[in-house]
Image (cartoon, grey):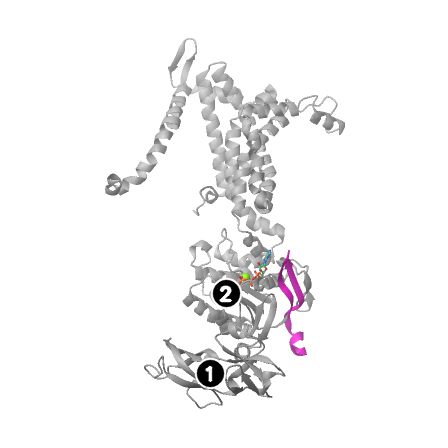
Amino acid sequence: MNVAASENADVRLVDVTKRFEDVVAVDRLSLEIEHGSFYALLGPSGCGKTTTLRMIGGFEQPSEGEIFLGDAEVSGLPAYKRDVNTVFQSYALFPHLSIFENVAFGLRRRSVRGQTLTGQVNEILRLVGLEGMGKRKPRQLSGGQQQRVALARALVNKPRVLLLDEPLGALDLKLRKQMQLELKGIQHDIDITFVHVTHDQEEAMTMADKIAVMNHGRIEQLGTPTELYETPATAFVAGFLGVSNLIPGTVSGSDTVQLRRGPEVRVRPEALQGRTGEVAVGIRPEKIALGQGQANALDGTIVEEAYVGVATQYIVETDCGRLTVYRQNASPGLNGASPGQRLTLSWSPDSTFVVDSMEGPE
Amino acid sequence: MGLFHRHRQLTPYLLLAPGVLWLTVFFVVPLGVLAYQSLESGNFDVGYSFTWAWGNYWDALQNYRGQFIRSLEYAGIATLLALLLSYPVAYWIAFRGGRWKNLLLLFIVAPFFVTYLIRTLAWETILADHGFVVHTLQHLHVLGAGGRLLATSTAVVTGITYNFLPFMALPLYVSLEQIDERLLEAAQDLYASKWKAFVKVTLPLSLPGIVAGTLLTFIPAAGDFINAQLLGSPQNHMIGNVIQSKFLELTDYPAAAAMSFILMAGILAAVFLYARAVGTEQLTGTPV
Ligand SMILES: Nc1ncnc2c1ncn2[C@@H]1O[C@H](COP(=O)(O)OP(=O)(O)OP(=O)(O)O)[C@@H](O)[C@H]1O
Ligand SMILES: [Mg+2]
């Protein structure tokens, strides 16, 4: 973390731990969220994402550690005194109030009245595409519309930080994809920091500028989507974001790894980061070529082929285990490779990453 | 089943039939008989005859206006007290009861396994002149040296409040129990303090329960006579006492019937005004 970023942080967690009786939901977690960023907390179920978000929102108090919003330490401050709003997974719209009054709720609590109130509510309803629906009750809206109301109800208050707990979880796939882009667009327009909780890696990659991959109440790795995908730091991250091939081996030089049941391969020197002994070499499926031509090569037999539209997926049996390979379907028809065929796979040292162990996500 | 298939549009009516029949036999017919009686004249010894005796109504209003007003007044105060007493209890059970919820609800209902009469007689003992309560209150100078509780309006209202409490507490509990606690978190997220969240979210969402409880308490309470008879003096008698004695002791059926109708009209008027005040949506659960 550089100094400039920490001066501009909207949210800062310092060594925050949350215990529920004997469960440690969040374990000495520290993070810093820059103003204006779209920050995703990504991780498997039960890793402590919601708990982290609820502590930022003020619905849970940390067992240990400190939480800052801007420069102010807020541990102990109740939710209603925090300049933070939440979009709940269940939306939690007030069933007895109209859409207009739902959206106006926060403004009224802060004594915004009359023309100003009406203007702000209508403006935000227009922003989320619900113009003219103000008089309806929540139960008269579709799931996607309710989701937008929940968003509008939070955004209208122009909080320092907007917290979103799996806000798209209840929507069908198509609507979810559409809302992902819309949300990103809205965030871009209004310049509010978004903290987005999700267990969907694709969603996190699509929307976020920064992703914190969580596991067991801790941050496993923090980075941009590209960094996490291209250079995952652990086997867990490699397996959680997309598909990766991990091949066990031993470090044999400054930029070489001797595979356990195969040849010596070259990796990027910086990927080794001074590691010695047992490691695993990782290669993404789309970065492996069918046929020779790259510095690292491995022989194998195609055992399965699956056509998935943009690409064809091959499972190739090698001495080092089964590898997954994607080949883009750049021209019509199949690529000419078929099950049973023996071939050589090759990849560039630049496309590799190295992680410590072989354990993937549980 | 052939019948149901061929006459599908008849099904709702067939399903309604038992209810309609029940209401006709046990409500509409007796009501008609009562209306007929209320316009008769005569007495038990010479017999009654139908004479369009509207005077029965006039006399009832003239002679027992005090008791009519007292009935609505006592019932109103008792309903309000029952609401104020039950709301915190129902709230606590609904939101904090956890796994004890059912047991706590049972405690509310438990006294009602004992008959109405016995329960009220028990209150007679509690409020008795030489009882513990009166002594304590006298000792604390809340009551004067010769002060009593029994045979006062306080005793009657207390008795009614106690006897109808579950009719208030249970509907309140049901409506509070249904409230999604995440809504309260949402309210706090939107800058509402705990109290504001209660006023703006919990209270409006529990309004159907308040309305149901109020009606279930007020309507029978306004017609009650046991509490006034056992815990009150003649100065505290309600219209129920008058109707009861006219029917059973004085056998003045026409006057008793007329009073019953006036009471019914009074209650209907009160309920109507109440419904206007809180909005019909709360009574029927649908927007108008
Ligand atoms: N109120 C609570 N009481 C006890 N344990 C809790 C409570 N809230 C959360 N936990 C536990 O803390 C851990 C983290 O829960 P959390 O809800 O933060 O997970 P999550 O990452 O949001 O998971 P999901 O993706 O399933 O929503 C879990 O083991 C959970 O059982
Ligand atoms: Mg969660």
**B264 lies left or right of B198:** left
For residue A123, which numbered disc appears in the image? Answer: 2
**Quarter that holds the N terminus of chain A:** bottom right
Pick whichever, A86 or A303, lies toward us: A303
A334 lies above or below A195: below
A350 lies above or below B62: below
Tell me the chief SS of the magenta region: strand
Characterize the local packing of mark 2: few (<14), some (14-19) or many (20 or more) Cα atoms within 10 angstroms: some
| Residue A312 visible in rendering | no
Pick whichever, B279 or B199, lies toward us: B199
Q: Per the image, is A125 magenta?
A: no
Characterize the local packing of mark 1: few (<14), some (14-19) or many (20 or more) Cα atoms within 10 angstroms: some
Kindly report the distance in space between the C-alpha atoms of the residues bearing marks 2 and 1: 47 Å
Residue A168 coordinates in the image, percent (x, y): 48, 64
Residue kind at label 2, given as amino acid type = Glu
Quarter of the image holding residue A190?
bottom right
The span picked out in magenta is: A1-30
Quarter of the image holding residue B225?
top right
User: At 58% from the left edge and 38% from the top edge, which residue is drawn?
Assistant: B83
Whether callout 2 and callout 1 share a subunit is answered yes
Residue A254 coordinates in the image, percent (x, y): 60, 88
For residue B130, which numbered disc appears in the image? Answer: none
Read off the residue under disc 1: A287
User: At 43% from the left edge and 8% from the top edge, which residue is drawn?
Assistant: B45
User: At 58% from the left edge and 69% from the top edge, which residue is drawn?
Assistant: A214
Residue kind at label 1, given as amino acid type = Lys
Pick whichever, A328 or A8, lies toward us: A328
Residue A317 coordinates in the image, percent (x, y): 43, 79
Q: Is mark 1 within 8 Å of ligand 1?
A: no
Q: Earlier in the sequence, mark 2 or mark 1?
A: 2
